[in-house]
Amino acid sequence: QLQMQESGPGLVRPSETLSLTCSVSGGSISSGAYYWGWIRQPPGKGLEWIGSVYYTGITYYNPSLKSRVTISVDTSKNQFSLRLTSGIATDTAVYYCARSMGVAPFDIWGQGTLVSVSS
Amino acid sequence: QSVLTQPPSVSAAPGQKVTIACSGTSSNVGKNYVSWYQQLPGTAPKLLIYDNNKRPSGIPDRFSGSKSGTSATLDITGLQTGDEADYYCGAWDTSLSAGVFGGGTKLTVL
């Protein structure tokens, strides 16, 4: 059974970079059938797709975040990562990593990790 | 402002049926498959429906989805108190080359 787990700092200072890693177990991130994505959810609000990466490094990003986002994959560690630069308060959210069949839909999710952007 | 439009809330009595609507455009719902997610309080979203009307293994047939044009619907029959959750629709938007979600619908089982 494939499982996904997010990890990273729970607090980021404004203007600094938010960095998270998703570790995948029980399956290979290099499986060609899937993309690997990040979705976030501000407290009390809805879901926002951040972006997705294929094991070859092909990426798709939310246009509203594209200038600040980088998603990368490390097949040797079976992990993929999110970097969001120039953190602002509205980046405060629960960040989920998830697997998608193609670029959508997301069939397996991590438990999520809360990241607060605050001084 | 979400790309896909859902009603903020719906409610129905136990045992009844409820329908949740999701409205989009020709570049997302109208062109691509729709998926539905259930998010119980304090938990990660769970895939309920994919490719408009398919259920992943383990999802009861009380949950069904359909699509017509630029709108999709999620039907839940035989409502149970355990169905109280937030429900989100999602799709790929070809014009944006991005994934998009609805704003979510809170289901209350009275």
Image (cartoon, coloured by chain):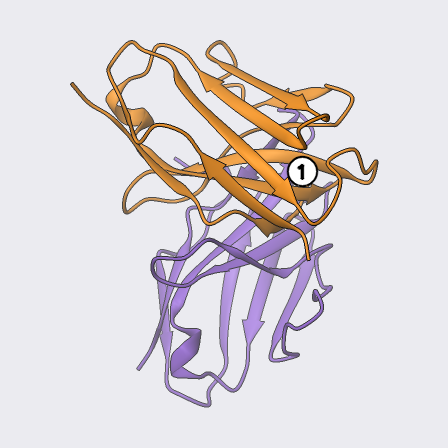
Chain colours: A orange, B purple
Vertical side of B64 occupied by B21: above or below:
above
The answer to which of A112 and B87 lies nearer the viewer is A112
Identify the subunit bearing mark 1.
B
| Quarter of image, res B28 | top right
Residue furthest left as drawn: A119
Q: Point out residue A118 in the picture as x, y percentages from the top left corner.
A: 19, 22
Q: Residues within 10 Å of mark 1 (few under 14, many from 20)?
A: some
Q: Position of residue A25 (x, y in %)?
A: 65, 45
Locate residue B45 relative to residue A1 in the image: left or right: left
Q: Quadrant of residue B43?
A: bottom left
Question: Is A52 above or below relative to A27?
Answer: above
Instruction: Locate the N terminus of chain A and report the quarter of the image it occupies.
Output: bottom right
Q: Does A109 appear above or below A103?
A: below
Q: How many marks?
A: 1
In percent of the image, x 58 and y 37: which residue is there?
A23
Q: Is residue A13 left or right of residue A96?
A: left
> Residue, x 67% and y 52% (percent of image)?
A2
Residue, x 49% and y 9% (percent of image)? A67
**Element assignment for label 1:** loop
Outermost residue, bottom side = B15
Q: Quadrant of residue B61?
A: bottom right
**Residue at point 71% right, 63% down?**
B53
The quarter of the rendered structure image containing the C terminus of chain A is: top left
Check the image and name the residue furthest to the front. Answer: A77
Answer with left or right where residue A11 lies relative to residue A81.
left
The location of residue A54, given as percent across then percent down, is: 73, 27
Q: Position of residue A43 (x, y in %)?
A: 28, 42
Q: Amino acid at mark 1?
A: Ser
Residue at the disc numbered 1: B26
